Amino acid sequence: MAQRVAVIGGGSAGLTCIKCCLDEGLEPVCFESSDDIGGLWRFKETTEPERSSIYRSLVVNTSKEMMCFSDFPMPAHFPNFMHNSLLLQYFRLYAEHFDLLKYIHLKTTVCSVRQRHDFSHSGQWEVVTESSDGCKETHVFDAVFVCSGHFTRPVTPLSAFPGVDTFQGKCLHSWDYKDPEAFCGKRVLVVGIGNSGGDIAVEISRFAEKTFLSIREGRWVVSRMGTGGLPLDVVMVRRSFTMLQHLFPRALVNWAVERVYNQKYDHRLYGLQAQHRILDRRPLINDELPARILQGSLQIKPNIREFRGSTVVFDNGAIEEGIDAVVFCTGYKASFPFLPPSINNGPEGELILFRRVFPLSLEHPTLAFIGFLNATGPVMPLAEMQARWVTRVFTGRNHLPPLATMQRIIKKEMKAKIKRYSNPTMAALEVDYVPYIESIAQEVGVHPNLLWLFITDPGLGWRVLFGPATPYQYRLRGPGRWEGARQAIFTQWERVTQPLNTRPIPEPRSSSHIHWLSVAGSILLIFTVISLQMRNPSFLQDQVTWMKSLITFI
């Protein structure tokens, strides 16, 4: 008899968990509290307690080829960066293609998840659910996926803003924000410079009399558009770039990337200068913020010192009067009210997870969190890879290391992260996309064998190493291998360019020659480096030493 697995949440993480369960011979039962799938990406006119909420205009900041599920490419005609409604359409296509909808119980809320009395022996869970008509039901499951997201409980730290109780204008969190029209002709203050804060400030600035964006720390701001007008993540999220970051001194790579972005606009001049290096944290992705600052419709302000009614005093002594509304884009606190308190086993009651998935407090690894992280890249492929790994742990095909080993790994990871993120809670959530997905792929046994690819299929090997790290690469071999993976990789650029080619223009004859010359030059460079290294084993080390000397001089 197949093991029964509860999947809590019918968003992107929940859908891929259902499919991964089916791939491994498990029996999934998904509980979704709303009346449709989509989770975070489903826009609703009004907010609902303990549920994610998005604004009407929200567009994804990772491109379709990078964020799709690994065995289901997005439609070629979809734009590279989609409106939330199109992403929801993709989820429906995915669910219908793999026949997932029949496993989802809509309008069903999970009230509690508790270990059974014989958990030490069985590892089973008792799950209590409530349907929309108030009917409660108790289920027994062999394992549980938690896919309810971590953008459900907004944080508004009003105590950090003295005098805010004297402010009589409109005050809301980004979780409540839906449209900019309500701020037409107003003087609006937006607090916080995460991706939501940047989007909302820009959007409101088109309607408001004046918009101010108060930031405590600076941020590096990058556009969705990369070199040659291609999607930024398609250009930057590559194995080869990750290798360069390890080959050359990190300070040198940071300096080079920062120089590129400061040539577009000087972050210091625009009041955006960050204290951290550009590759140390996720940047703010926003196409219009610098332009709105340049036009004067949006002003960057430092942290708020105090409110005096409708007057706001900032840390630098600047004063803005007649503020009509304040939008707090101050983040969220992870909330899982249905789970037992014992899950939070950290020294300060926080949730400690191995590989951001498995709680250390459990005797049996039969409960897992999916998508509970932030990444320097798309989250959906990470959630899918996590689900592929977890289902194999649930079935006993994979095993976790001993507790002491997991604790040691977590401690080592946190030590490295805390150097980049001063806030321990934030640090725990952050992962670097390529190293993280590669580490989980190795656990599953689906990590691409680059040497074998270059020997047996050089064209594919070249694309995997030097091309964008698209999710299809993790379907080339091992469990869950997909026959269409190679073709998906070879046609990925067609899907990137198709929505752009609405007015085809013939390419000049010389372009093909330039392309092949650049390819030949790249191959020549690689063989030159290999040859020099074979003749002088210390060649690469000498170059690294020289680069370190150069960056020290700079």
Image (cartoon, helix red, strand yellow):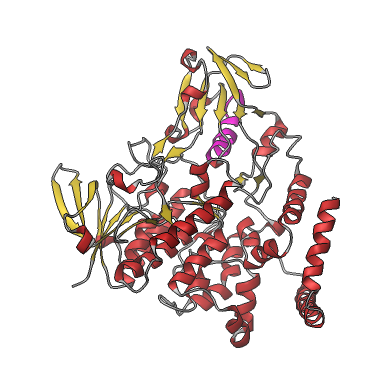
- Residue 98 in view, yes or no: no
Name the residue nearer the viewer: 84 or 175: 175
Name the residue nearer the viewer: 171 or 124: 124
- Magenta highlight range: 196-211
- Image coordinates of residue 121 in percent, x first then y, are 20, 63
- Image coordinates of residue 190 in percent, x first then y, are 56, 29
Q: Is residue 158 left or right of residue 116?
A: right
Rendered residue at 47%/24% (across/down): 158
Predominant SS of the magenta segment: helix
Quarter residue 466 falls in: bottom right
339, above or below 312, in the image: below
Q: Is residue 491 left or right of residue 176?
A: right
472, above or below 199, in the image: below
Rendered residue at 58%/66% (across/down): 469
Quarter residue 201 falls in: top right
Q: State the quadrant of the N terminus.
A: bottom left
Name the residue nearer the viewer: 543 or 325: 543
168, above or below 526, in the image: above
Residue located farthest toward the bottom when viewing the structure as drawn: 456
- Image coordinates of residue 188 in percent, x first then y, are 56, 24
Rendered residue at 30%/71% (across/down): 395
Look at the image and say whether residue 115 sits in the magenta stretch: no
Name the residue nearer the viewer: 469 or 546: 546
189, above or below 452, in the image: above
Q: Is residue 512 left or right of residue 413?
A: right
- Image coordinates of residue 522 in percent, x first then y, are 76, 74
- Residue 157 in view, yes or no: yes
Residue located farthest toward the front when viewing the structure as drawn: 404
Query: Count the marks: how many?
Result: 0
Look at the image and say whether residue 199 sits in the magenta stretch: yes
